[in-house]
Image (cartoon, grey):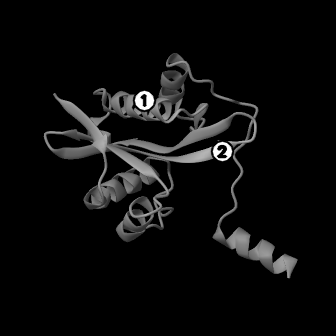
Amino acid sequence: MEISVRKAEAIDMPKVLALIKELAIFEKEPDAVKISVQDLQNHGYGATPMFTCFIAEVASNIVGAALVYFRFSTWVGPTVHLEDLIVQESMRRKGIGEKLYAAVIRYGHLQGVKRIEWNVIDWNEGAIKFYENSGAKVLSDWSVVQMDETGISNYIEKLD
């Protein structure tokens, strides 16, 4: 089976969105995806793209994606954040995720970043083991903090 990885184009975003929805189901959050194909196209392409997406193809079918964007660390400087690495469920354990992961690491290296970072759900032991075996450190002493749209609105109301 030949696996090819390339940068995604705007026309690939319907399939990327389908993969994002599949990931949400895997992560037990089937109703969490609020974005549209148009959101992905508008924010990933044009004069100031907010992200770069890599896709994996097998027999010209998109079976995986990795979405990354730049961040800046006050401690080390420029970093890349891997938002999601997704492989279609029926295509897992065939080396596709590893090829996407390698593309992300290579991309960060070529961009000269000082760190590549991402989150992993604590129950995804296979992914954790894979990342640790690749040389990544899984930080157990940090917690992810998020504020959703409702939280943002509620906080702003308190300020006014």
Q: Which residue is mark 2?
A: 72
Residue 43 position in % (x across, y down): 45, 64
Q: CA distance from mark 1 to mark 2?
A: 18 Å
As drawn, the label of residue 16 is: none
Quarter of the N terminus within the rendering: top left
Q: Which residue is mark 1?
A: 106
Quarter residue 89 falls in: top left
Residue 122 position in % (x across, y down): 60, 35
Above-or-below relation of 135 to 117: above
Give the residue type that dot 1 points to. Arg
| Residue occupying the point 52% across, 25% down | 131
| Residue occupying the point 38% across, 33% down | 103
Tell whether 112 sits left or right of 99.
right
Residue 137 position in % (x across, y down): 62, 24
Element marked by disc 2: strand
Q: Residues within 10 Å of mark 1 (few under 14, many from 20)?
A: few
Q: Nearer the viewer, residue 37 or 107?
A: 107
Above-or-below relation of 90 to 13: above
Element marked by disc 1: helix
Q: Nearer the viewer, residue 100 or 95?
A: 100
Give the residue type that dot 2 points to. Phe
Whether label 1 touches label 2, CB < 8 Å? no
Quarter of the C terminus within the rendering: bottom right
